[in-house]
Image (tube, grey):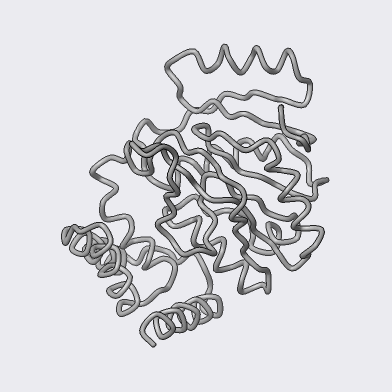
């Protein structure tokens, strides 16, 4: 509510909290009429992707389609005061952008340092902003691990740009993955399968992940997850034409990285 450009509507989804969150939300809804708080109960297990997207989609049910910009925010973030103003200004100057956001900064012994493990043009899932045209073109968000990769791949398929604004520093209070359960380990491999990466690209991507995390187990878990998804015939999240586009895009990125 201290933003220089205020959102027209704010939906706060209280998903299985066991502390005083509900009371805090109620206090703000009484102060600000544009804030709506709703209760939602997902499964207790913190499985990456499905839980957070289901909560987002539940909140989206409370909104109409009369919007220009739709923003998904996690609860553990502190935004700079001009966050929405800067995003709106960028979209006005570059209407080809479909997904936009800043960069995540996490606390360290040196203060707040940027933590952006993905490519520079990737917007972290915790603070994604979508234009209405882009969100409708990609068919909304998929309640699956890898959702914040699928949305960007489909945005590019539909000729939208994905943009990160380096001057927007978002403070991330809880490092990624700290609350994931062990049963989620093989889900990265399953995500690669349902995104139609194919085995070779999935293997290369898993090797890269294992190298960056300095953990060979990541490679093993990913490949196990991929093979399990293939064996049970897990439904793909994108169609064949979109899958071909995704594979070509990934191969192009691999060639650029090598040469």
Whether residue 68 sits left or right of residue 237 in the image: it is right
In this rendering, the answer to whether 233 lies above or below 180 is below
Relative depth, front residue between 216 and 19: 216
Residue at image x 47%, y 44%? 105
The picture places residue 25, in percent across and down from the top left corner, at 61, 18
Question: Which quarter of the rendered picture does the C terminus lie within?
Answer: bottom left
Whether residue 144 sits left or right of residue 95 in the image: it is left
Whether residue 239 sits left or right of residue 67 in the image: it is left
In this rendering, the answer to whether 95 lies above or below 180 is below
| Image quarter of residue 256 | bottom left
**Residue lying farthest to the bottom in this orientation:** 259
Question: Which quarter of the rendered picture does the N terminus lie within?
Answer: top right
In this rendering, the answer to whether 86 lies above or below 155 is above
Residue at image x 38%, y 43%? 176
| Image quarter of residue 2 | top right
Residue at image x 73%, y 55%? 131
């Amino acid at each position: 509510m201290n933003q220089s450009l205020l959102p027209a509507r704010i939906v706060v989804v209280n998903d299985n909290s066991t502390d005083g969150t509900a009371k805090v939300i109620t206090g703000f809804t009484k102060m600000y009429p544009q804030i709506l708080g709703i209760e939602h109960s997902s499964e207790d297990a913190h499985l990456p992707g499905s839980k957070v997207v289901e909560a987002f989609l539940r909140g989206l049910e409370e909104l109409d389609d009369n919007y220009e910009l739709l923003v998904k925010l996690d609860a553990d973030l502190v935004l700079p005061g001009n966050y929405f103003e800067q995003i709106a200004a960028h979209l006005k100057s570059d209407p080809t952008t479909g997904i936009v956001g800043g960069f995540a900064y996490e606390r360290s012994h040196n203060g707040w340092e940027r933590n952006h493990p993905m490519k520079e043009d990737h917007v972290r899932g915790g603070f994604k902003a979508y234009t209405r045209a882009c969100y409708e073109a990609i068919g909304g968000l998929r309640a699956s691990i890898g959702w914040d990769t699928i949305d960007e791949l489909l945005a590019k398929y539909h000729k939208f740009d994905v943009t990160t604004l380096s001057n927007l520093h978002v403070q991330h209070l809880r490092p990624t993955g700290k609350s994931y359960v062990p049963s989620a380990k093989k889900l990265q491999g399953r995500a690669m399968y349902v995104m139609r990466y194919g085995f070779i690209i999935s293997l290369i991507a898993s090797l890269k992940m294992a190298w960056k995390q300095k953990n060979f187990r990541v490679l093993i878990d990913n490949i196990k997850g991929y093979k399990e998804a293939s064996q049970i015939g897990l439904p793909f999240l994108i169609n064949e034409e979109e899958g071909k586009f995704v594979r070509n895009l990934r191969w192009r990125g691999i060639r650029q990285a090598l040469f």
